[in-house]
């Protein structure tokens, strides 16, 4: 019964974890168990009652054993005792042999989900515990910017026509919680979902082929990738794996050019170990829950309205200084499970959307857009808007394919006009605005969060010659190669050629056309190998950076 309960608990954890993350849970997830409890409402919202049937055998057997609790106990000198012991040993040996028979032939599979499917869940869990999964570290002498650029297939001579266009301006980067690209321009029965962001999009550079690059840390991983131009670590969140290092970063780069740097987030800085992340990235100041207080709180802190109002006031103070500033603003009100308070509703959903996950998501993002519109108005009123480079992007997906039920999938098909697929799920927007300095344009180049740092530096006229980075200036290159981790199996990548997910090997792959359309995908084995090498170089470089000297308590 004890073994049965343990095995059932593992199966249940695997179901719930896959429903939330779309990956197979392993022992590595135990490092983030305290974070999972913080988002328990999100996790429970995904649990269908029938999942509990997995515990039915325990109830039935428990009742049976209770009725037969007077079962006979054998003495050690009884022949039946020794026969039982022998049979148990034989059963264990046969079971172990069968497990190895499933594990050994499948351990070389590149795709973790296929590996778990073919090994079996329990065998896969055991395999991850005992396998040597530490990636090989490449010597730093081999990790040069030239080597990285060649792996990425960049044109070394290409220069952005907008290089230095926003020189001397402030930089404000807004990270929108769970915001996917399909929301921009979307109307539901004639109702515009994001009117404020739509206006900004039409008057800015807009990148419709832009993609998330986060892992288990989700929002905090987005902050890491955007501000470092490195990929997420092989295991766990960046806030757990990389924060002991002195990270080259956008805050440090701009401080060296005379900028003030500050980041805003209404949650406690300890959530996802952000305090350590912010120190590792070199932010001069951060403002968290202690600054924003408890006014108008839901989910993890004060509403986006409070975030933007108090942030705008603080930016006005900073603007009085002679030095420009870089501020990153992390929104949060549209957080999973998207059940915002009724008094925050800014739209009436059609009946078919009511009570659905997709409906809650659309309504939450409609509110997030409303609050963002107030932020824009405040920045314009205090004179900061005209003197700033504004970059707005979504941190990660809000509607995972594996979290949607039948009704939700029908609504997504209605929205897209086709089945909702992986490129749609991973597609987030990027909008870049600099009043009077950048003309509106839709840029079809493929990009990811790793590209925000070099693109911002180029527009501000700040050199990255001495900063190793794995992103690229999106305005100087038409080709891109984006290795993916965590939410897609190992070896997956997004490139101008499309999205490719390998199976047991490259040959056993699945390809998709990108979310914003384009030619039939034709990802190559060369791109596959280069993507794997880029991931290896990024992790190797970060792991060999000097350890950070931590401040005394």
Image (cartoon, helix red, strand yellow):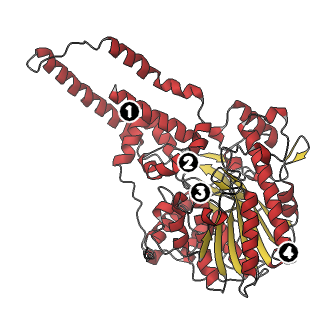
Numbered badge on residue 214: 3
First in sequence: mark 3 or mark 1? 1
Please indicate, yes or no, whether residue 504 appears anywhere in the rendered image: no
Tell me where residue 60 sits by quadrant: top left
Numbered badge on residue 502: 2
Tell me if mark 2 has few (under 14), some (14-19) or many (20+) residues whose alpha carbon lies within 10 angstroms of its own.
Answer: many
Residue placed most toward the observer, 426 or 5: 5
Q: Which residue is mark 1?
A: 6
Tell me if mark 1 has few (under 14), some (14-19) or many (20+) residues whose alpha carbon lies within 10 angstroms of its own.
Answer: few
User: Which residue is rendered at x = 72% and y = 73% of the image?
Assistant: 314
User: Which residue is rendered at x = 43% and y = 48% of the image?
Assistant: 30
User: Which residue is rendered at x = 76% and y = 39% of the image?
Assistant: 359
Horizontal and vertical percent for residue 368?
76, 54
Horizontal and vertical percent for residue 302?
68, 57
Q: Answer whether labels 2 and 4 touch (C-beta < 8 Å).
A: no
Q: Answer whether labels 4 and 3 touch (C-beta < 8 Å).
A: no
Q: Which residue is mark 4?
A: 435
- Mark-to-mark CA distance, 3 and 1: 31 Å
Left/right placement of residue 442 relative to residue 357 reads right
- Mark-to-mark CA distance, 2 and 4: 43 Å
Name above or below for residue 343 compared with residue 472. Answer: above
């Amino acid at each position: 019964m004890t073994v049965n309960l343990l095995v059932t608990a593992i199966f249940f954890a695997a179901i719930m974890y896959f429903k939330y993350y779309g990956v197979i849970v392993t022992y590595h997830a135990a490092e983030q168990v305290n974070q999972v409890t913080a988002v328990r409402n999100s996790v429970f919202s995904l649990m269908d009652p029938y999942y509990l049937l997995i515990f039915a055998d325990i109830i039935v057997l428990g009742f049976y054993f209770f009725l037969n609790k007077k079962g006979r106990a054998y003495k050690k000198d009884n022949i039946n005792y020794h026969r039982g012991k022998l049979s148990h040993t034989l059963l264990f040996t046969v079971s172990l042999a069968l497990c190895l028979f499933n594990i050994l032939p499948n351990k070389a599979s590149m795709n973790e989900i296929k590996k778990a499917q073919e090994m079996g869940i329990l065998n896969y869990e055991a395999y991850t515990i005992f396998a040597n999964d530490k990636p090989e570290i490449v010597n730093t002498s081999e990790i040069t910017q030239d080597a990285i650029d060649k792996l990425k297939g960049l044109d070394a001579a290409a220069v952005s026509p907008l290089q230095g266009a926003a020189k001397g301006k402030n930089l404000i980067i807004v990270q929108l919680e769970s915001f996917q690209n399909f929301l921009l321009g979307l109307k539901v029965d004639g109702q515009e979902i994001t009117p404020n962001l739509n206006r900004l999009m039409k008057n800015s550079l807009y990148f419709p082929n832009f993609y998330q690059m986060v892992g288990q840390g989700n929002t905090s991983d987005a902050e890491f990738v955007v501000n470092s131009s490195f990929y997420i670590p092989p295991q766990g969140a960046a806030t757990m794996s990389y924060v002991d290092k002195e990270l080259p970063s956008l805050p440090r780069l701009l401080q060296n050019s005379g900028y003030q740097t500050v980041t805003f987030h209404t949650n406690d800085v300890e959530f996802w170990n952000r305090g350590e992340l912010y120190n590792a990235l070199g932010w001069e100041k951060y403002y968290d829950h202690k600054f924003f207080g408890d006014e108008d709180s839901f989910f993890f802190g004060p509403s986006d309205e409070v975030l933007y109002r108090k942030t705008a006031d603080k930016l006005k103070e900073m603007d009085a200084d002679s030095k420009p500033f870089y501020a990153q603003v992390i929104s949060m009100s549209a957080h999973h499970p998207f059940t915002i308070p009724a008094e925050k509703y800014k739209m009436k959903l059609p009946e078919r959307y009511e009570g659905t996950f997709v409906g809650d998501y659309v309504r939450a993002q409609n509110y997030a857009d409303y609050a963002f519109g107030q932020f824009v108005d405040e920045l314009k009123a205090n004179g900061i808007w005209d003197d700033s480079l504004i970059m707005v992007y979504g941190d990660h997906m809000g509607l995972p394919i594996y979290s949607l039920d039948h009704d939700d999938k029908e609504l997504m098909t209605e929205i897209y006009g086709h089945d909702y697929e992986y490129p749609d799920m991973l597609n987030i927007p990027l909008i870049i605005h600099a009043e009077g300095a950048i003309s509106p344009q839709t840029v079809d180049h493929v990009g990811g969060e790793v590209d925000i740092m070099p693109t911002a530096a180029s527009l501000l006229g700040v050199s990255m010659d001495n900063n190793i980075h794995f992103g690229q200036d999106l305005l100087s290159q038409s080709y891109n190669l984006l290795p993916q981790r965590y939410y897609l199996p190992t070896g997956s990548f997004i490139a101008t050629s499309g999205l490719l997910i390998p199976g047991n090997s490259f040959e056993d792959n699945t390809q998709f056309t990108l979310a914003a359309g384009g030619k039939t995908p034709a990802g190559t084995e060369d791109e596959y190998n280069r993507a794997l090498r880029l991931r290896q170089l990024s992790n190797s470089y970060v792991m060999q950076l000097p350890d950070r000297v931590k401040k005394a308590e």
